[in-house]
Image (spheres, rainbow, N blue to C red):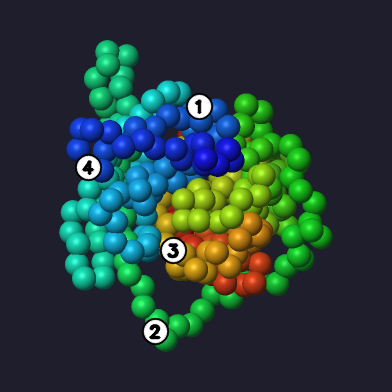
Amino acid sequence: MSTHPLDKALALAHSDIRVGHFTGATSPDYWNMVGPFGGTTAAVMLQSVLKHPELLGAPVALTVNYAAALTAGAFELLAVPVRTNRSTQHWTIQLSQADAAGQAQIVGTGSAVTALRRETWGANDLPMPEVPRPMEVERLSIGPAKVAWIDRYEMRPISGALPVRWDGSGDQSETRMWVRDAPARPLDFAALAALSDCFFPRVWLRRARPVPIGTVSITTYFHVDAAQLSEVGDGHLLGRATGQQFRNGYFDQAAQLWSEAGALLATSNQIVYFKE
């Protein structure tokens, strides 16, 4: 059994309640300020689909809605294949946790699409930006206090790092950085789902103010199959993220992840709550 922190965080056990019902627990290795890193939550929800005995194909899309904050401890997952066709499968995912009275409460919902991919014509209209190679960029060594998950990633910001001065002088929201799991780990779909959420809040860059935030919903699209992921191995990914609209307490983020070879692996969009 792998001892990598991510594999331990993704560990799920089948229960006897019904097919597709799993139990797991939060990981202190991926703790954020007030709960688990949202990327890990998305990854573990996808993991419930990947471990389902009726799985068809590989992930094409994943949407996770964060209904409430997870607390430290045990949780339950229910993954249900609601429709299976010849080459595609549609899923609902439910994440729950017992409250103080021992009653199960929904803390997250999700949906996923998996598919058997086939060879077709293809093109990439979003080429990887020209940037320095990973080892030519200094690694981020200090993250926000009380945020353990930052240490689980090797981040090498090229541009758009956290503000040096939190003085309200921010004027852009784009980040470009090389990133991979720390310690290095061969890439798989669950890890890719987590990496799609590894960018600091766009509003922090745009405003240069550390306002409270919380992701409401994130959707990730996977553009590779398992064989292509295997080619990436434990190499770095180039990530780019930018905000598009900041208004009335919410902002969105669009992000892309490329391999070192320039293959577009995943794109994601999320909507995030922020507080003045």
- Secondary structure, mark 3, is strand
Residue holding disc 1: 34
Residue 12 left/right relative to 99: right
**Mark 3 or mark 2, whichever is nearer to me:** 2
Residue holding disc 4: 19
Where residue 181 appears, as percent x and y from the top left, is 62, 48
Give the residue type at disc 2.
Answer: Thr
Q: Given the current orientation, which residue lies at the most extreme top position?
A: 101
Where residue 136 appears, as percent x and y from the top left, is 81, 60
Question: Of the residues under marks 2 and 4, which one precedes in the sequence?
Answer: 4
**Tags 3 and 4 touching, CB below 8 Å:** no
In front: 76, or 271? 76
Q: CA–CA distance between discs 3 and 1?
A: 29 Å
Residue holding disc 3: 222
**Compared with residue 164, is residue 234 higher up or lower down, i.e. above or below?**
below
Residue 61 left/right relative to 258: left
Give the residue type at disc 4.
Answer: Val
**Mark 3 or mark 1, whichever is nearer to me:** 3
Question: Of the residues under marks 2 and 1, which one precedes in the sequence?
Answer: 1
Question: Of the residues under marks 3 and 1, which one precedes in the sequence?
Answer: 1
Identified at 19% across, 67% down, the residue is 85
**Compared with residue 197, is residue 231 higher up or lower down, i.e. above or below?**
below
- Secondary structure, mark 1, is loop
Question: Of the residues under marks 3 and 4, which one precedes in the sequence?
Answer: 4
Q: What is the crowding at mark 4: few (fewer than 14 residues within 10 Å), some, or many (at least 20)? A: some
Residue holding disc 2: 120
Give the residue type at disc 1.
Answer: Val
Where residue 94 appears, as percent x and y from the top left, is 28, 40
